[in-house]
Each structure stands twice: as structure tokens, then as C-alpha cells.
Image (cartoon, rainbow, N blue to C red):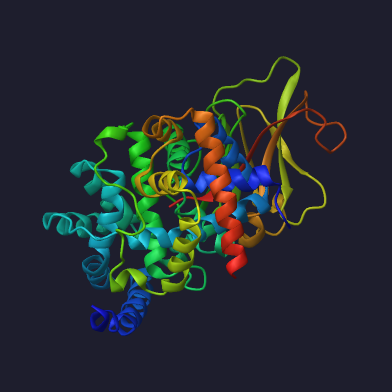
Amino acid sequence: MALDETLEEMAGEYVLGTLSAAERLEAQTLLSQNSDFASAVDQWTERLAPLLLAIPGVAPPPALRQRILASIGSAASSGNVVDLARRVTFWRGVSLAASAIAAALALFILFKPMPQEAPGNYVAVLQPEGPGPAFVAAIDLKDGTISVKRLGSQAEAGKTYELWAVGGGRAAPQSLGVIDASLKIPTEHLGKVDPATLGDTVFAISLEPQGGSPTGAPTGPVLYTGKLVATE
Amino acid sequence: MAIVLSFMPIAVGIMDSELRQLLAHVAEADKAAFGRLYDLVSGRLFGVIGRILPRAELAEDALQETFVRIWQRAKSYDETIASPMAWMATIARNQAIDLRRRSAEKLSAASSEIDESLADSAPDPEALAGQAGELRQLKDCLQRLPDERQQMVLLAYRQGFTREELAERFKRPVTTVKTLLRRSLIALKECLDGAR
């Protein structure tokens, strides 16, 4: 499908690295929500990469070799990352968004909201239109739970936040429960946890009346959306 | 010179398949293969990084980050999507740009000694691994852009210039730079799509 020209240009500039901070955030949000935009970004990455191959090499200082070889000793090869949709993992894992994700993950680790250090964890950072993530969601494939932690942003009186799973083969948004300060639910609630569709699932948080949506579908404004990122 | 160049395809073939094999071993956490990979590509990757991060200690950090990432992501490398060199060079570029933005290292337009041009960057044989055709096509299409726009695209992509830095360097308003970049990208896409 042909992408709207403005989005095509934005995808190109995203890869070129010339977007402003605000546009960049917008692009990163789009990346998780609009698969046409995401594939345009992949195509730009592939289109421009050959330019790097024409740059002459420069020998790094010899001492660096030892330092780098030693540094990988502690960093395990992340074998559990590969199950998500292949192309998504391929470029997204090395993309410019990396530092934004790293910042969010730092938050996640700092708050220690759920069982960590376990391999097979997936994390979704739900970020608002404004700056900074306010919710962190993690899926632990080992003990089969989804945990969501609120990092500030208390709901106004008489309202609650509700977590939804959207896309990934679902016909309609699926409620995963109401988030008070935190929420922990079994992954069975997601249905079959297929890593391929998990990568396509967008998590969203809407503002609902106390006790959650009365209709089973989001009724209030959708405040946050996010996608899963495999933790390493 | 022509005789020397005629050696290229052979060297290229060996290099490319060797890199694929090494990456497959690295994916299995083979440290010896990782060391060999380092010996083969660290110079090329350091070249990519050095344009974006002229300060040595930052460039060295970026190279380390790049190799950690290669080590961690080797399993997700897919030869049907990109050549090994293009994949690793993209990682190196992205690490360097992330670091450049994070450390707010401003490469003022005046301090940049490297003039971007397509002519100066005759790639060595290894550089062409698997991508000789794509590089030539991209160069052809870039060369159809007016000189200033070519420079802008190259400075942004290979040296990590922001819109503001480009505006300063070319003495143009930031909004004009944005428009010129976007027009250049669309022209580039149309040219490349037409060539397929």
C-alpha cells in the first residue's frame, strides 16, 4: 500500500536522522502503530545503507580489541529475542530508536516493578503524547504473567485506567483489566501467546469510569499506547 | 589501475561469505569467531563511526557498543534482508548517532574537516561486498540531485548533521532545509524505484 507522501518523507527523515525531537517521538509512536510506516522506515534503512560502505576504514587503537572482547563476556547472546516477527527484530533492534528505548528500560529497572533478571521477559513502555513514559508493562513468559506498573499519573477522582490489547489478530480491543497502582494478570488472558502476534499487539491504556469500561470496549480517551520490546 | 580493479569480484565473494559464516558462529556465542569478525570489520566500522564522532574516546565507546550489539543481535541477522557489512555498518552508524545526540556533541559546521562527496569515496573491495550494484545505483541517483542537496543528504546520513547544523552550514533557514531534505528523499526514492 502506498504511504501518504508526508509519512513517506517522515520515514525517510527518521532514517536520515534529521527529525526534530517532537517529530521523532511522533515517528516512534507511528512505528509501533502503523505497519506501513514501519516498513517504509525499513526500506529507507536498506536504501541508504550502501552509502556507509563507501566510507574508508580507519584502524581503531590496538588496545580497544582487548577491551571489546572482554566486554562481551558479560553480555549474553540474546537467544530469546528472535521469535518476534523477523524483519521487525532485524532493523528495529538496531534502529535509532534504541536510545529512547534504553531510557525507558532504565526506568523499568529502576522501579523494579516485577520479576526481573528472568529471560523470556517482554516489556512495553506506554508513553503519553507529552514527554516520558508513565506506565511500564512487562510480560514474563516463564511465570506466565503480565504486570503493569503506574509511574505517577494518578487518574482523576472517580476514574480508573484500563489496559487493552489491540491488533495481533484480535477483532476488537480486548480488556486486560483495570490498573490501580499496579496490575498483574496471567498471560492466559491474552489468549494464545504466540510471539509472532505478540509483536503485532499494541497495548493501550484508556481512562474509564471507576471499575472499568461498562461496555467491554474502551469508552474514554486512549491515553497511552505501546508495543512490546524484548528485554535483553 | 584497471588491472587491480579486476581482482575485486573475487575478493568480494570471499569476504561476504566469510562474514556470513562468522556471524552464524557469533550467533552461537563463539568468541573466537567474534575475535576474527572484529579483526575483519572493526576498521570499516570505526571509519563509519569516526565521521559522526570525531572525538576519539566517544568513537571508541561507540565501537564497543556496536560490537556488543552485534554479539547480542547476531541471531537476528538475516542475509535475505541485508549484506553482513550493510547490517553491521548500520548498527555502527546508529550507535554513533545515538551517542552524538546524547552527549550533545555539536559538530559545528566550521569544525568539520571532511567534505562529503561521492567522488572521494571510492570503496575498497571489501566495502562492495554484496552491494556493488546497489551502491552504484544510489550514487547515480544522488548525483542527479543539485550539489547542495547531495551534500545535505550525505552530511546528515554519514556525519549525523541535524537540520539546525545543516541550516548553519548552508546559511539557510531550518524550514528550507527540511523542505530540501524531503524533496531530495522523494526524488531519490523515485529514481531508485525507477531503476528497479
In this view, the residue in front, B171 or A13, is: B171
Residue drawn at (39%, 55%), measured in percent from left and top? B91
Of B61 and A125, the residue lying toward us: B61
Quarter assignment of residue A110: top left
Q: Residue furthest left?
A: A63
**Above or below, B187 relative to B139:** above
For this view, does A83 lie left or right of residue B90? right
Q: Tell me the residue at 44%/64% (across/down).
A: A79
x, y (%) of residue A62? 12, 58
Where does residue A207 sit, x and y in percent of width and height?
74, 27
Image check: A38 left or right of B120? right
In the image: residue A52, left or right of residue A35: left
The relative height of residue A102 versus residue A83 in the rendered view (above or below) is: above
Residue A138 can be seen in this image? no
Nearest the viewer among A40 and B123 is B123
Outermost residue toward the top? A157
**Viewed as shown, does residue B58 lie left or right of A134?**
left
Q: Can residue A38 be seen in this snapshot? A: yes
Q: Quadrant of the N terminus of chain A?
A: bottom right
In the rendering, at what x and y percent does residue A8 appear? 63, 48
The furthest residue to the right: A215
Q: Residue at x 65, y 58 (%)?
A: A193
User: Based on the displayed image, in which of its 4 quarters is residue A26 positioned?
Assistant: top right
Using the image, determine if residue A221 lies above or below residue A59. Answer: above
Q: Relative to B92, does residue A110 appear above or below in the rendering?
A: above
Query: Where does the image place residue B76, in percent across and percent down from the top left?
Result: 47, 65
